Amino acid sequence: MFCLFQSGVGLTRCLSAPPGNPPQVWRRQWRVLTTCLLLALVAAPAKAERLVLGEVLQQTLLRNPELQLFPYEQRAAEANAIQAGLRPNPSLSLSVENVLGSGEAQGFESAETTLQLSQLVELGEKRQRRVDLATVQQRQKVIDYEFQRVEVLTEATRRYYELVYRQTLLEWSRQRIVIEQKALDQIRARANAGAAQQADVSGLALRLAESQAEQHLLEGQLRLAQRRLAVMWQSEPEAMWAEGDLAQLERIPSAAQVLNAMDRAPSYLQLLERVRLMEAQRRLEEANGQWDVTLGMGLKRSEETNDTSLLFELKVPLQLNSPNQGNLLAARAEEEQALHHQRLARQTLRLTLLGVHHSLSNQMDRIEHLGQSLLPLAHQWLEQVETGYETGQQSVLSLLAAQSKQFELERQRIDARYSAWLQLLELERLTGQSFETVTQTDPSPENQS
């Protein structure tokens, strides 16, 4: 992401010898140059697995354990839809009367045998309402999966850019150590020549040690980011190198584009489907409040007269009051609650999107201000201090202050770029849409070198 010598100490400056013993200084400068080249070679480990974002998303879709559960849930929903469409089975009954009694009813001589086939007939479109409810539930499973898929892919993308961020910080830290090591060698040479105090050498050595300790911390955070990314597809953590670049500034979507995508937001579609689900549940409860009839037909035989006759039956319940009144009232209340929740969630989502978009716009302004104003000024200041330091007009404290400000602003820009990417991902997560962005020319010194 960064040019190795972008902070004002170029290759020619690495080779410039400060006052002192020339052979000794040139040997030190050669060690510095060798260190620079080695760091450039090891910035992206050759044996590390290089990943692009498309590969990360593909592996996550194929192997993420949360997404692998959907086929089982889908089959269960399909089975529920089949169950909802089943009709009531007919019933067969056999009854024998006037047997094993007294008098003429002794034995089986006066027995009357009835064989009857009955069928419950559902009225009020109960079966269709069950099918409608199961269909909505099945569709809700698909929408829930889409919501979960967006969440998982967003998290995988977030972890991918976290790895890019950690890589960038590690490169920034390595570059800082190279510059500080060079400055330490220079001040040591000056101290040996009697042109600087030993306290200045100790101060720079302490600063270098702090930078090396920070680099060790960043290396640990990089390994943790690699592990977190590998977990997304249940892979053993290995050395990974993300082929991303936070320096590629993108044109962010407008507020109108973001709001236009709100109606396709996964969370909003979930609420819409829940309203449909509550409506289907209410319609089923209305249908369950309708009475059903039972139709029957059979044969009746009398052993005493040896006669056989047909039997017809019609059963109709007496609906003195609604048997489903409580369930229907509850279903209506839940439907109204879902509608109210939908309206509130839409307004909340709108305000959230506008807030995230505003924060993203502020971060982009911050990145532009750093690249066009602050960093060029810091770059100019560092060059002037280095020139004055080499001629003895500037103190080591001024050099330290200029270098610190240069690296501080570079770190701020890295953090701002990473924050901008995270906020753009949050917009895409909330809307479920991938906003097309166009790479802009970054006016920073690193792109001008």
Image: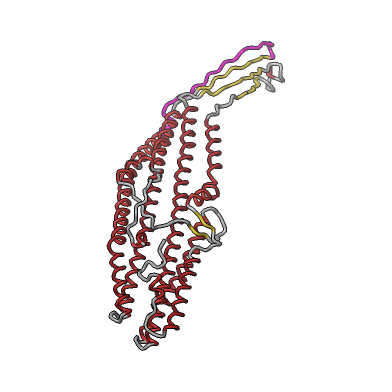
Q: Looking at the image, which residue sits at the far bottom?
A: 194
Query: Foreground: 277 or 143?
Result: 143
Residue 290 place in picture, x, y as percent: 44, 26
Question: Is residue 11 rendered magenta in the image?
Answer: no
Above or below, comparing residue 133 to residue 270 in the picture: above
Queried whether the magenta region covers residue 309, the answer comes back as: yes
Q: Position of residue 262 (x, y in %)?
A: 35, 42
Residue 273 drawn above or below residue 25: above
Nearer the observer, 111 or 54: 54
Residue 212, x across and y down, in percent: 44, 74
The reply, left or right, for residue 121 in relation to residue 416 is right
Name the residue rendered at 48%, 33% in the picture: 135
- How did the renderer colour the structure? secondary structure
Q: Start and end of the magenta stretch? A: 303-325
Q: Position of residue 66 (x, y in %)?
A: 52, 49
Q: Residue at x 41, y 43 (%)?
A: 266
Position of the C terminus, as image quadrant, is bottom left
Along the line of sight, the residue nearer the viewer: 306 or 376: 376
Tell whether 293 sits left or right of 11.
right
Quarter of the picture holding the N terminus = bottom left
Residue 215 position by quadrant = bottom left
Residue 344 seen in render: no
Residue 415 in the image: above or below residue 26: above
Q: Is residue 255 left or right of residue 177?
A: left
The answer to whether one can see residue 172 in this image is yes
Please tell me whether residue 81 is drawn above or below residue 345 in the rendered image. above
